[in-house]
Image (tube, rainbow, N blue to C red):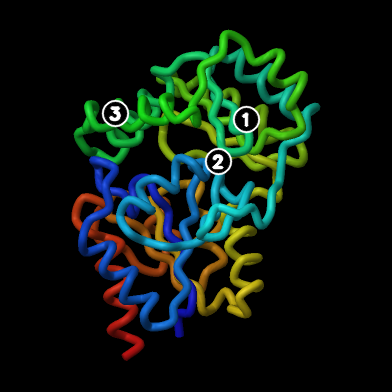
Amino acid sequence: MIRLIAIDMDGTILSPDHSISTKNKEAILEAQSNGIEVVIATGRSFSEAFEPINSSGLTVSYICLNGAEVRNPFGELISATHITKDDVRKITSILDTETIDYQLFIDTIVYTKDIEAPIDAFIQLAKAANQIPPIDEIRKEVMGRVEQGTLQEVDSFDDLIQQRGNEIYKIFGTSLHRQHLDNARNILHTLPGLAVSSSGAGNLEITHALAQKGIAVEQYAKSKGVSMESVMVIGDNYNDLSMMKRAGRSVAMGNAPAEIKAACTVTTTSNAHDGVGLAIEAILQLQK
């Protein structure tokens, strides 16, 4: 019996244009009306995650930044796990050596040295899913965050790391050069205390070792008195693997890589074809 559903955002609940379809929304509302807890589990910061979810009319809790923070439906912080300043310096040195662009996630703000970098990251995510990126919509969404102050451009990260190096949740690196990413990933994996994953072929997501979706979902489920056998997770990429391996029922999106599909219990349709809604409807039908 599924009692909790954890859902990824990009490539999963969000359609290629970054909206939430009517079927996905209605399926979540039906699950909630049947007493099933629904939580978003995303690599996004809270400010990036909240807007599309709230705009759709949904009320859920949030596991953000791959598990580095958990917030209730009102945005109140429940838990936080940061990278140490020493590790931040090691990570950024590795990324700089490999000429990988990166962003720093602190509280609800994302810091970048180039506003085009987050735009390119979303475009690459769409391409990785074999979809045509809605560039105008992506740019509008990103520039909206700039206006709100939740995405800020800085000339250098040096002062930021010096002053707030122990407050960094996640470092998100992007590159069009696969070899550079592979080189950095291999070195990062040798550093203890870190979790290194990705949400697409062109990026690296680096957090504290305890900041992983699987750990956060398990802790959240426990706080609700729910065993992992009664948890269903839905996702599409490598940063979802930790929760897929722990859940009683794991669902891969149709647009997920083959390795992700192989790791899951079932596969649904793509994020362009209401995969989340169909997966939830299927489990609700089984539990009638």
Q: Nearer the N terminus, badge 1 or badge 2? A: 1
Q: Position of residue 224 (x, y in %)?
A: 61, 75
Q: Residue at x 34, y 78 (%)?
A: 283
Q: Position of residue 93 (x, y in %)?
A: 69, 17
Q: Residue at x 52, y 41 (%)?
A: 45
Q: Are marks 3 and 2 in contact (CB under 8 Å)?
A: no
Q: Which residue is mark 1?
A: 186
Q: Position of residue 63 (x, y in %)?
A: 55, 54
Quadrant hosting residue 274: bottom left
Three-letter code for the amino acid on which mark 2 is drawn: Ser
Q: Which is in the foreground here, disc 3 or disc 2? A: 3
Three-letter code for the amino acid on which mark 1 is drawn: Asn
Q: How many marks are shown on the rendered structure?
A: 3
Q: Which is in the foreground here, disc 3 or disc 1? A: 3
Q: Which residue is mark 3?
A: 140
Cα–Cα span, label 1 and label 2? 11 Å
Residue 197 got which mark? Answer: 2
Q: Is residue 63 left or right of residue 262?
A: right
